[in-house]
Image (cartoon, rainbow, N blue to C red):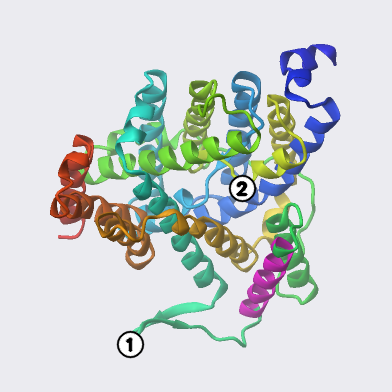
Amino acid sequence: MSRIASYFQFEKLGTSFKKEVTAGLTTFVAMSYILFLNPNVLSAAGMDKGAVFTASAIAAAVATLFMGLVAKYPIAIGPGLGVNAYFAYSVVIGMGVSWQTAMAGILVAALIFLILTLTHIREKIIEAIPHNLRIAIAAGIGLFIAFIGLHNAGLIVANPETMVAMGSLTKGTTLLAIFGIALTLILIVKKVPAAIFFGMVGTALVGIVTGLIALPHSIVATAPSLEPTFGQAWSHLGDINNFEMIIVALTFLIVVFFDTAGTLIGLTEQAGLLENGKMPRAGKALMADAVGMTVGATLGTSPTSAFVESSSGIAVGGRSGFTSIVTGGLFILALFFSPLLAVVTSQVTAPALIVVGIMMAGNLKKIKWEDMAIAAPSFLIVIGMPLTYSIADGIALGFIAYPITMIAAKRGKEVNVLMYLLAIIFMAFLFYTHS
C-alpha cells in the first residue's frame, strides 16, 4: 500500500487510497455506457457486436492503464462518441466503404498519431488550427450524434417532401425512447452521478417489463471472440491507396486530435494539475491515447479518446494515476458481462446519443459570433455535419471558408500556412467525393 501511495504521490496530491478507488469506480460507472453503445453504433456498419464489445473493453483497459501507470493522470480513455458515428454512418454507409477498409483508415491514423506524438509535432499542428474552429468541430459532432440519436429513437424520419419529419408517436419503441430521453435528462438536471448509465439501465428495464425488449439468456459469460474483427485493419492496409481513403484517415486523425487535446486540458485544469497553465507529462498522456487507438484498430473498434466523464471521478477526489488503474481494471472485469448487449437496443442508446450531443453543443457559446470572419466558417462546420450527414464534409466546408473570410477581412496574415494547405486539400476532397 505504501509503495502505491509513494509511486502515485498521494500525499503531495492530497488524496488517499480510498479516494482513488472511489474515483476510479465512479469514472467507470459514468462511462461504462460506451461498452454497450459502441457495439450498437458499429453494428450499423456490419460489424459483429460481440467482437466490438470485447475490442472496446480491451482497448479502453490498455489505454486507461497506460494513462494511470505512465502518465499518472486520473483520466480514462475509451472509444469516443462522434468519431464512431463518423466511421459507421459517414464512411461505411455514406461512402460505401467496407468496414474492414475503414478500420484500416483508423489504423493509418493511429500510426501517424504515434509518430506525431513521439516527435512532438502534434502540439504544433493543433496550434495551427484556430481555437474557434476546434470548438466548432466539437459542437458540430454534438449536433451530428444528436441527430442520429433522434433518428434511432424514431422521432425523426425521412420524408420525400420535406427531407425529414417527425416520426410516429404511437409506436411502442418510440415511446420507450422518449421515456429514456426524459429519464436521462431528469437524472442529469438532478446531478445524479453516472446519469447516462442509469438512464440506459432504466430504459432497458422499462423495455423488458413492457415486452419491447427480450430478456437476456444470462448475465455473465465468457468474453465474445475477437475473431470476426481481429487484424482486419492490418490485412486491409493496402486499401488505403487513393485520395478518398487518405482523406478519411486524416479526418479520423483530426477529430481525435482535437477531442483528446481539449478534454485533457479541461480535466487536468479541473483537477488542479496544470503547472503554469501547461500540462506536465503531456506527451505521455497523448501517448496513452495513441496506444489505445492503435490497439483498438488492431482488435476492431473505433478510435479512442480521453473521456470527459472522467470529471465525475475527479469530482469525488481522484487526483492520481491510481484512479485510472482502478477504472482500467474494471474494464477488464466488464468483459464477462457481454450478454447484457441483447437488451441495449437502439431505443436504449438513443437517449445517450442525444444527451451527449446536448453537452457537446455547449461549445457553441465559446465561438466569437460577433466576428463574422470566424463565425461564418465555424457555423458551416457546425451546421454542415448534421445536414450533410458527414463530419468530414462539415469540417471541409469550414476549413475552405476560413481563409476566404479572413482574406476578405484583410486578416490573411493571421492565417497559418497549414490552414491554406488544408483548405486546398479539403476542396479537392469535396470535388473528388461529390463529383
Contact, CB < 8 Å: mark 1 with mark 2? no
Query: Is 373 located above or below residue 259 in the figure?
Result: below
Residue in view at x 78 percent, y 16 percent: 4
Real-space Cα separation, disc 1 to disc 2, in angstroms:
39 Å
Q: Which mark is residue 161?
A: 1
Query: Which residues are the magenta region?
Result: 173-188
Residue in view at x 25 percent, y 57 percent: 397
Single out the mark in the foreground, 1 or 2: 1
Residue 364 in sight: yes
**Mark 2 lies on residue:** 50
Q: Nearer the viewer, residue 353 or 111?
A: 353
Where residue 302 sits: x, y (%)?
48, 43
Left or right, 425 with reference to 7: left
**Location of residue 241 by image quarter:** top left
Residue density around tag 1, few if under 14, some if 14–19, many if 20 or more, within 10 Å: few
Q: Nearer the viewer, residue 148 or 357?
A: 357
Left or right, 102 with reference to 150: left
Q: Secondary structure at mark 1?
A: loop
Query: What kind of residue is marked 2?
Result: Gly
Residue density around tag 2, few if under 14, some if 14–19, many if 20 or more, within 10 Å: many
Query: Is 394 located above or below residue 287 in the figure?
Result: below
Where residue 398 sits: x, y (%)?
27, 54
* Between discs 1 and 2, the one toward the N terminus: 2
Query: Is 39 located above or below residue 178 in the figure?
Result: above
Residue in view at x 77 percent, y 13 percent: 6
Where residue 297 sits: x, y (%)?
47, 36
Left or right, 361 with reference to 432: right
Query: What kind of residue is marked 1?
Result: Glu
Q: Secondary structure at mark 2?
A: helix
Residue in view at x 76 percent, y 37 percent: 23
Task: Give the total number of marks visible in the rendering.
Answer: 2
